[in-house]
Image: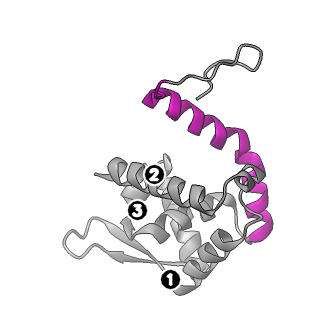
């Protein structure tokens, strides 16, 4: 892992720390976020905030409050996003089966079609992914799934 700027870049033989890996992942995502959003905006007919929520709901049904936490936004903003997604026919919102104070948001077939079409479009991902072959993308996917599972447990 490279930990210094290009003039003083040294390749370490030691295993990178968790913090170094976090900084590298965070930088890659943030440095390419605008490009990625623009590509998604060109592909779907909705604000990126809606697609971002839809993608989260596609992973699993969740309460609106859980969605708000995962998106890092407040309850009124989440309610507006979910209302729009319901109006578009992309999600449903039903009372929680055991706790009526909560609403469970579920993706519809049309919502799933949109998420799947974006995921399947190779032009959405930043061009840096072209440097990875199939085995490397599989390995990276496995590692990201492990991190995702740990974050949700």
Q: Is residue 86 magenta?
A: no
Q: In the structure shown, which secondary structural element does the residue marked by tag 2 occupy?
A: helix
Q: Nearer the viewer, residue 146 or 112?
A: 146
Residue 121 in picture, x, y percent from top left: 72, 71
Give neighbour class at mark 3: few <14, some 14-19, many 20+ (Cα, 10 Å). many
**Which mark sits nearer the N-terminus, 2 or 1?**
1
- CA distance separating discs 2 and 3: 28 Å
The residue lying at 39 percent from left, 53 percent from top is: 146
**Which mark sits nearer the N-terminus, 2 or 3?**
3
Q: Which residue is mark 3?
A: 64
The residue lying at 48 percent from left, 28 percent from top is: 16
Pick out the residue farthest to the left.
98
Give neighbour class at mark 1: few <14, some 14-19, many 20+ (Cα, 10 Å). some
Which is closer to the viewer, label 2 or label 3? 2
Region in magenta: 14-43
Residue 59 in picture, x, y percent from top left: 45, 68
Pick out the residue farthest to the bottom.
109
Residue 63 in picture, x, y percent from top left: 36, 64
> Residue 17 falls in which quadrant of the image?
top left
Residue 104 in picture, x, y percent from top left: 36, 71
Q: Nearer the viewer, residue 27 or 135?
A: 135
Q: Which residue is mark 2?
A: 143
Q: Is 84 drawn above or below residue 48 in the view shown?
A: below
Q: In the structure shown, which secondary structural element does the residue marked by tag 3 occupy?
A: helix
**Which mark sits nearer the N-terminus, 1 or 3?**
3
- In the rendered structure, find residue 5 and report the number of the disc placed on it: none
> Residue 6 falls in which quadrant of the image?
top right
Q: Which residue is mark 1?
A: 108
- CA distance separating discs 1 and 3: 16 Å
């Amino acid at each position: 892992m490279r930990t210094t700027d290009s003039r003083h870049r040294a390749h370490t033989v030691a295993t990178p720390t968790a913090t170094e890996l976090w900084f590298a992942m965070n930088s890659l995502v943030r440095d390419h976020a605008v490009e990625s959003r623009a590509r998604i905006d060109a592909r779907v007919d909705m604000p990126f905030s809606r697609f971002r929520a839809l993608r989260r709901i596609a992973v699993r049904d969740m309460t609106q409050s859980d969605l708000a936490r995962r998106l890092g936004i407040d309850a009124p903003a989440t309610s507006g996003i979910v209302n729009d997604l319901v109006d578009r026919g992309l999600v449903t919102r039903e009372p929680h089966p055991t706790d009526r104070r909560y609403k469970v948001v579920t993706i519809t077939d049309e919502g799933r079609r949109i998420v799947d079409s974006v995921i399947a479009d190779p032009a959405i991902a930043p061009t840096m992914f072209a440097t990875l072959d199939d085995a490397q993308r599989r390995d990276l996917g496995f590692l990201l799934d492990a991190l995702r599972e740990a974050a949700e447990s």
